Amino acid sequence: MAPLPHEIPLSQSPDSINRTTPSLSASQNNAGKTVKLTSIDDWILEAVALVVSAGTIVAIAAILSHFDGQQQPDWPRVSLNSVISWLSTIASAGLMFALTNSPGQLKWVWFARQKKRLSDLKPFDSASRGGLIGSLELLWLLKGRHFAVLGSLTAILAIGFDPFVQNLLHYVSSAIESPSQVSLLGATSLYNVAGPIIGADFHYVNPILKANVYSALFNLDPTAPWTTPQYTCPTGNCTWDPISTLAMRALCSDVTPHINRTCTTTTSDIQNCTVRLGDDGPTAWYREGGSTSQPMAMAAVASTEALVYTNSTFPVIQYVLAAGSNNNSEATWEIAASINNSTRFLATECALEPIVRSVRAAVSSGTYMETVLTEWSPYYYPNDSSIFEFALIPPTGNTTFGMGYEAWSSLTFFVSTLFTGFVYASSGTFGFAAGSAASYAVTDTIEAIFYGNFSTTATSPTIRSYNARNQCTDQLSCAVTNVAAAMSKTIRDAVFTSSSSSRTGSQTTGHTMVMVSFVAVHWEWLALPAVVWVLSCAVWLGTAVQTRRLHLHTWGTNPLPLLFLYRGTGAHENESENENGDVNADVDHPRQLDRPTAWTTSALDHAAEKLRVRLVTNAHEVALHG
């Protein structure tokens, strides 16, 4: 059965279509040349889309420029990211509207220049949908020989439009001061805190100071917790302006040259030998050829009996140690047999000195740090000792620092008893003993100094601010350095832990820092969106110019011209469907359909509105039936 005149046989070949479908006559082509692009209305939508896209890109740049380097805005119902994302979508949609219409129009330009294969419609149509595959197909078809190549390249670049815009916006964390959160750090100028009364005007030492000193001697934590003052930092990141506070530091010297060793012969092969520091200092002894000894002796002496620190306001601590006797904590009484006339003895003298210390403190990620700015040590004894037992007045400022009598006397008693004792070793016996009335943990202190591994804390960054001269060279100097750090902490903490009547100072307010996000714009990512917009304008303008130059209608992606160009001129009036749903047409009563009155878009739409078509397929053909 031959196809009806009003059918479009989709299964026929292009040659057959050309033979059976009326084509434009030469006169019609010449008439078409009179078509003029007389109004901008044909391209107004693309122009508006490009203008909107440009305005949106400018808006994105303006918004990001405003917030660049600023804190991330805290908007109630929308975020900066979503605003940029919405604007990017609008800008991209405007570009793609112009880009997809341009390849659709350029296919008419492609066929208007000269006769082309009908199959070329497919890549043009695919490219007009804005897809990557379609654009690549069109590039392969044209191979750089047509203006539509620029449109395909622009469409491919446009795929990166949204990702590039999203990469404009980055966030970096930075600290700013929070006015609503308070950070505190202690600074004490007068310290007069003591423990329970012993009798008359004498007191035990402040229990908090005692606990901190014991921690410094017995808890050899490398983080040196006995150096960290009490503070308040709710966010874990705080800074303080420089503060000055009363503190203590350790001064130590090697006094080994002052050792006097004497030996007395008791039998032909045994000598009793003593190793004394100065005339009245601590004395170690051993029995040459025997098995008994006292390898370490320690004493707290008055400054008048000191060898170096003769002006100390606190007792001076001295010790004598048989070198190497404390290397092995499991040797115990075997130490006695290892000490003889060839053993070298060491001696150290240390003093605790009150100072005014100026520091700059900070807390970073919950870790306290401070830098010592300066230390001031000359002190004097005021004529009126009702408040200060001794006082310090730094050259800068008018604050007087010092310590009251109760605190000074309790510390004097504490130091003199805590650091007086010895180590003894003989056959089957080993131990630690106090040298006088043991009111405190003397034997534990002697053990800590004799066997303690202070080297790990000597190099700690925290401890070095309490030992400006880095004198931690042996057991005693390291131990006293830790003790001075513990005392300094206790003095500073007094503004938090003690009543205002026993100290003078303040809780210094610092700067509480909070981590917030700041906007950081990477402007280099704006290059692609800008280039895509410029190319889109070039494609749009070039398409319009070529359309006008060839006197073509502005059909764009409209499929109706293709249907009307290849549609027959007749239609059958009497059609019905049989029981199987097939269309039956009465070929004896044809109904003639008029072609569009004009080839403008509006005329095509008007003509198409009058038609009702249906896709029908059977074993021999595929056609749209009218």
Image (tube, rainbow, N blue to C red):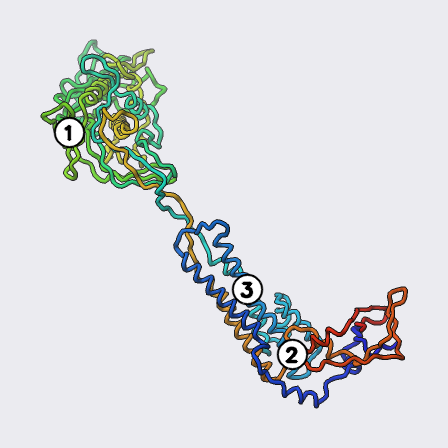
Q: Quadrant of the C terminus?
A: bottom right
Give the label on residue 391, or none: 1
Q: CA distance from mark 1 to mark 3?
A: 76 Å
> Whole-percent x and y of residue 273?
20, 15
> Observer-nearest residue: 444 or 504?
504
Residue shown at the point (27%, 27%) measured from the top left = 494
> Whole-percent x and y of residue 246?
22, 31
Residue at numbered disc 2: 108
Marks 2 and 1, the one that precedes in the sequence: 2
> Mark 3: few, some, or many residues within 10 Å (few <14, many ≥20)?
many
Task: Check if mark 3's residue and mark 2's residue have beta carbons within 8 Å.
Answer: no
Residue shown at the point (76%, 73%) measured from the top left = 611
User: Does 72 sit above or below residue 603?
Assistant: above
Marks 1 and 3, the one that precedes in the sequence: 3
Left or right of 542? Residue 557 is right
Corner quadrant of residue 24: bottom right
Q: Is residue 13 visible?
A: yes
Corner quadrant of residue 577: bottom right
Left or right of 370? Residue 17 is right
Residue at numbered disc 3: 92
Task: Say which amino acid is labelled 2.
Answer: Trp
Q: Secondary structure at mark 3?
A: helix
